[in-house]
Image (cartoon, rainbow, N blue to C red):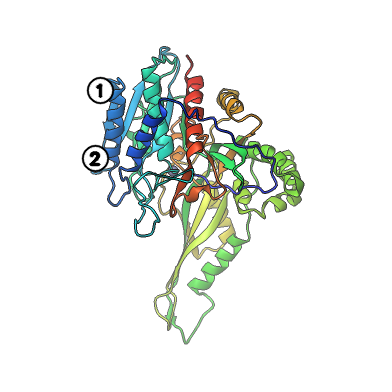
Amino acid sequence: MKRILALIAGAVLFATGAHGAPDDPGLPRFRETFKELVETNTTLSVGDCTLAAQRMAARLKAAGYPDSDLHIFVPEGHPKEGGLIAILHGSDPRKKAILLLAHIDVVEAKRSDWTRDPFKLIEEGGYFYARGASDMKAQAAIWVDNMVRYREEGFHPKSSIKLALTCGEETNSALNGAGWLVSHERDLIDARLALTEGVGGYLDDQGRRVALGVLAAEKTSQNFLLESTNPGGHSSRPVADNAIYHLVRAIDRISRYEFPVELDDANRGYFSGMAKIVGGEAGAAMQAVVANPSDAKAVAILDRDVNWHAMLRTTCVATILEAGHATNALPQRARANINCRIFPGDSAASVQAKLEELVADPKISVTIPEVRGPIATPAPMTPAIMDPIRTVAAKLWPGVPVITVLEPGASDAQFLNPAGIPTYGLDGIFVDPDSGNIHGLNERVRVQSVYDGRTFLYRLVKLYAGA
Ligand SMILES: [Zn+2]
């Protein structure tokens, strides 16, 4: 998943300019890499991530990487869901590595629904069109291209630079490659920081740059099951003790509850930065909340925006209801799924305790049906992380602010952060307000944005790795 954030009207804007060095001799080769990755179908249904990983490994091998630094991994029982780890060794063994992570699987796409073939890289009217053009094969191709360029130019980083291409990010039920690496190849991917897909940059509807986003924290998705059981009986003789009534009253109480506002580096940075861009009543509310998270009036203004509401706190919402077994019988069972998005650092147990308190009914159980992954912990926003981003961004896009973002959804960072690898989402690819319709029909990304993102990431990783 890539990030979609509401864009702000009336913002401070910066005109776009070409920075992609159109005469860059490496550009045609980058395009070939991108094209090959897009045109290797990596959907879960009929695609093959292992094949895509092998093709990228072949490019690295051609650039001079020895086989010993190229690791194709294929999780047992998942022959087409493999990936690649590649390593450019650093000169300073005391410095831990930089990990460049990209998922190479894509969301399903039906040729008959699309205007163009989703598995061909098509350039038209200044855009690349393809499934994965934006989420996230452009960045995956940039990572591969980076690794090739560093090797060819004889770049000797202090820190090792590691590339991880993985499968299974886009489908909840699929095996997740990043999660698999954490549990099976933790040493191989060990790093002091990881970079992966993020919020990109924001363009307004005129194509002008508004801000560059850095994803610093994500929430954790956790389901809770509410269940009420009852002996039931004939519906002609109703009684007050009814499983459905117990359940709907509990859900009603949950629906009226707001978890308290929490601030961490990511959302504090977001609201501080966006306050100046947004201005007006919302901008003032952002500043007020950062100064005092219990400012109820300011919180109420921000809560009008679903995205800001979700960035401020843990949220829980009823997503599935099942109850009753016959139209003429008192229900013997009623259950609801409550999907919570837990604020970084909070525990599932504390949310469960709050739900039990809200349910306040011994006839209803609150359980956790399945734990998908560990609770997300926020990655620290230190100067060592932020300064290089600001330095490179200021050169490429003078005056465009860099804004940290707390993401209400979740990506592969959910596996790496708890494993002790702080993970940041950014690609330097500026996208339109519709975010290029990622996951949807006719996914697209601006050609120049991809080229600029390539320049940005090439320079940024060099700064992190040190010369
Ligand atoms: Zn993605």
The image shows residue 292 at horizontal and vertical percentages of 74, 41
Q: Relative to 211, does residue 318 appear above or below in the rendering?
A: below
Q: Relative to 187, does residue 364 appear above or below in the rendering?
A: below
Q: Quick check: can you spot residue 190?
A: no
Residue depicted at 71% across the width and 49% down the height: 299
Q: Relative to 78, does residue 366 appear above or below in the rendering?
A: below
Residue depicted at 56% across the width and 25% down the height: 392
Kind of residue indicated by mark 1:
Asp
The image shows residue 311 at horizontal and vertical percentages of 60, 46
Asked if disc 1 is less than 8 Å from ligand 1, the answer is no
Count of marks placed on residues: 2
| Marks 1, 2: nearer the viewer | 1
**Badge 2: few (under 14), some or many (20 or more) residues near its Cα, within 10 Å?**
few
Kind of element beneath mark 2: loop
The image shows residue 223 at horizontal and vertical percentages of 46, 54
Circle nearer the N terminus (1, 2): 1
Q: Specify the quadrant of the image occupied by residue 386.
A: top right
Q: Which residue, as the protein is rendered here, is positioned at the far bottom?
A: 236
**Disc 1 target residue:** 67
Residue depicted at 69% across the width and 37% down the height: 272
**Badge 1: few (under 14), some or many (20 or more) residues near its Cα, within 10 Å?**
few
Kind of residue indicated by mark 2:
Glu
Q: Relative to 455, does residue 304 appear above or below in the rendering?
A: below
**Disc 2 target residue:** 76
Tags 1 and 2 touching, CB below 8 Å: no
User: In the image shown, does 108 or 298 lie closer to the viewer?
Assistant: 108
Q: Quick check: can you spot residue 133?
A: yes
Spatial CA distance of label 1 from label 2 is 21 Å
Quarter of image, ligand 1? top left
Would you say 296 lies left or right of 395 here? Answer: right
The image shows residue 236 at horizontal and vertical percentages of 47, 87
